[in-house]
Image (tube, helix red, strand yellow):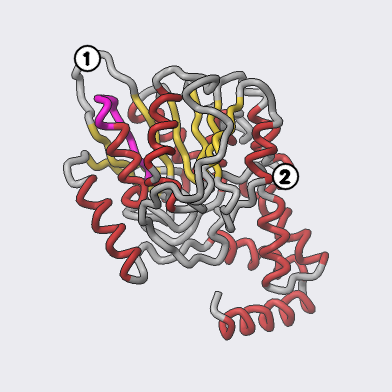
């Protein structure tokens, strides 16, 4: 948030929680779930968005309707009855969209696989300006229902965490997404830190902070501490490739290490020098993903080693959002 807007917001919450901490917490949750405008801001973002749109120009388009009138939007490449082929699902991070994932999507489609790229509710062409983890998992389930079982799922940031939450079946009443492999790029391993930081940013006191976190339980059926994707990685029993940069300033590298500690099914690939967003178009990262999806569990093709700092940097978008770690 801009400094002036933040000061006004802090003042508003200071007054509201003095009257009702519960009401302040609920209002804070609605603010937390409000997504940025889908319109790219700045020349770099506009250029990246335009390039991504060009890559997706030949894709089929689908609207996925969710409960409560929410919608997700899907792009599909290499669809239709063309014989046996792999099927992949790609999910974006908070404030992003399928256009910003297009380089990865294009690489996957070039293998001949059927590739589905989602716009979560509140993002891209999905409309509205609202998203929480429950809606993201519902969108993933809707994609599986519409297109069939995915051989692998690949997600960036919030989208990676949502895939892990879905694969582990953490939401009551929501069937786990079925897939053989998962790729998590710059993904958080749990959510509590985001709510703590957000509450601190807008000046919530303990009672209102508790109400904010209780709102998660109200809309998803699970408490905030239950959304531990790091622990979930040890329970799903499927190969997971975690890609992260130690210079990621939005999702600390400790999250990648938590995933790695989940057990032998999780491989960690350090993509140092590529930060939180450039990582999506980095040639070594795309090569590591391709090898992993081709059956390499990581013992040779996806080593646990840092990419050199002077590796080629692929320009990507810069998106100012209030909690971009999602």
Magenta stretch bounds: 109-118
In front: label 1 or label 2: 1
Q: Which residue is mark 2?
A: 223
Residue 33 place in picture, x, y as percent: 55, 59
Residue 289 falls left or right of residue 169: left
> Can residue 31 be seen by looking at this rendering?
yes
Q: Which residue is mark 1?
A: 83
Residue 97 place in picture, x, y as percent: 38, 52
> Can residue 136 be seen by looking at this rendering?
no
Residue lying at 50% horizontally and 44% vertically, measured from the top left: 308
Placement of the N terminus among the 4 image quadrants: bottom right
- Residue 111 lies in the magenta stretch: yes
Residue lying at 40% horizontally and 55% vertically, measured from the top left: 123
Q: Residue furthest right?
A: 206
Residue 109 falls left or right of residue 71: left
Q: Secondary structure at mark 2?
A: loop
Residue 185 place in picture, x, y as percent: 51, 41
């Amino acid at each position: 948030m801009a400094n002036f807007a933040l000061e006004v917001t802090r003042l508003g919450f200071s007054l509201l929680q003095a009257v009702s901490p519960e009401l302040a917490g609920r209002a804070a949750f609605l603010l937390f779930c409000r997504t940025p405008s889908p319109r790219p801001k700045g020349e770099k973002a506009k250029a990246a968005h335009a390039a991504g749109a060009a890559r997706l120009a030949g894709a089929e388009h689908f609207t996925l309707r969710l409960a409560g009138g929410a919608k997700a939007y899907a792009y599909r490449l290499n669809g239709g009855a063309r014989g046996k082929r792999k099927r992949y699902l790609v999910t974006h991070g908070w404030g992003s969209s399928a256009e910003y994932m297009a380089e990865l999507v294009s690489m996957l489609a070039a293998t001949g696989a059927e590739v589905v790229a989602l716009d979560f509710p509140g993002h891209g062409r999905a409309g509205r300006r609202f998203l929480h983890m429950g809606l993201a998992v519902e969108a993933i389930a809707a994609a599986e229902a519409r297109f069939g079982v995915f051989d692998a799922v690949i997600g960036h940031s919030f989208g990676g965490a949502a895939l892990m939450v879905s694969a582990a079946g953490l939401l009551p009443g929501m069937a786990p997404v079925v897939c053989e492999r998962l790729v998590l790029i710059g993904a958080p391993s749990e959510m509590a830190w985001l709510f703590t930081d957000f509450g601190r940013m807008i000046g919530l006191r303990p009672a209102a902070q508790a109400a904010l976190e209780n709102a998660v339980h109200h809309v998803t059926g699970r408490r905030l501490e239950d959304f531990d994707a790091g622990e979930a990685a040890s329970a799903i029993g499927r190969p997971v490739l975690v890609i992260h940069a130690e210079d990621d300033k939005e999702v600390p590298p400790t999250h990648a290490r938590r995933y790695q500690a989940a057990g032998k099914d999780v491989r960690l690939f350090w993509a140092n020098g590529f930060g939180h967003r450039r990582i999506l178009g980095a040639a070594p990262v795309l090569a590591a993903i391709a090898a992993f999806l081709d059956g390499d569990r990581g013992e040779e093709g996806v080593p646990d080693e840092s990419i050199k700092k002077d590796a080629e940097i692929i320009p990507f978008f810069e998106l100012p959002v209030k909690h971009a770690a999602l």
